[in-house]
Image (cartoon, rainbow, N blue to C red):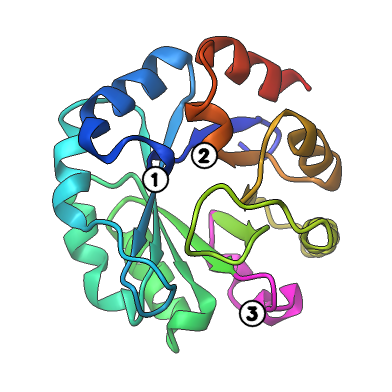
Amino acid sequence: MMNEIIISPSILSADFTEFGSAAQEIETSGAPWLHMDVMDGSFVPNLTFGSSLIRDIRKKTKVFLDVHLMIVQPGRYIRKFADAGADGITFHYEAEVHSQKYLAEIRGLGLKAGIAIVPSTPVSILEEVLPFVDLVLIMTVNPGFGGQTLIPECLEKVKKLVEIRQKSGLDFNISVDGGINETTAQKAKEAGANILVVGSAFFDCEDKKSLITKLKAC
């Protein structure tokens, strides 16, 4: 999968009163994934939604539900989000002591397991858990709010991760989240990312199907 460019629109940037319609818009746009940012107001300075919304969105769409847990002690909630209908669960290395244990649990539930890091965390800290992941998410903004500008230095972390992957012979995907649009998508892809999480750029665009095509091809 790591050679396939995947666009994952983030429903966090949608109108909160229209989540059902937003999920359907994502599916009809041709995007194969839907990104869901779960925030607890503690790990990041914002509060969004929980497993009940994942369960409701699951009823509205068949696309891959890419659930990103930005919460403290995410291991406590893995089964809850799995039961709600997540297809993949990504949690932050900074938020959990026993990362390998919970990555194995996610995989054991038949889901894709992901690990994420914030801009201040070095890629090197992940080396011991990389054999247990399907996805590494590099935050290209400080998480908590949508509509931010991509931090260019974070793309250097993507390049380092590509080098580690090549040397180790692993085959995990590399995702980027934060400030992704038509311009920055090209730079992210050149750095080696193959999963692009898109928020404001998607929901502010009238022709969403055309945008998805451009993001995949840019």
- Which amino acid does the dot numbered 3 rest on? Glu
Residue 113: quarter of image = bottom left
* Residue at 77 percent of width and 61 percent of height: 154
- Which amino acid does the dot numbered 2 rest on? Gly
Calculate the distance from the C-alpha at mark 2 to the C-alpha at mark 3: 31 Å
Q: Nearer the viewer, mark 2 or mark 3?
A: 2
Q: Position of residue 74 (x, y in %)?
A: 33, 74
Residue 22 magenta-highlighted: no
Residue 135: quarter of image = bottom right
Q: Nearer the viewer, residue 75 or 199?
A: 199
Position of residue 56 relative to residue 127, above or below, is: above
First-in-chain label (2 vs 1) = 1
Q: Nearer the viewer, residue 37 or 64?
A: 37
> Residue 199, which numbered label?
2
- Which amino acid does the dot numbered 1 rest on? Leu
* Residue at 71 percent of width and 34 percent of height: 3
Q: Which residue is mark 1?
A: 12
* Residue at 38 percent of width and 67 percent of height: 46
Residues at badges 1 and 3 in contact (C-beta under 8 Å)?
Answer: no
Visible in this render: residue 166? Answer: no
Visible in this render: residue 142? Answer: yes
Position of residue 1 relative to residue 152, above or below, is: above
Q: Which residue is mark 3?
A: 128
First-in-chain label (2 vs 3) = 3
The stretch of residues the image draws in magenta is 118-134
Q: Nearer the viewer, mark 1 or mark 3?
A: 1
Residues at badges 2 and 1 in contact (C-beta under 8 Å)?
Answer: yes
Compared across the picture, whether 158 is left or right of 127 comes to right
Residue 1: quarter of image = top right
Q: Position of residue 32 (x, y in %)?
A: 46, 26
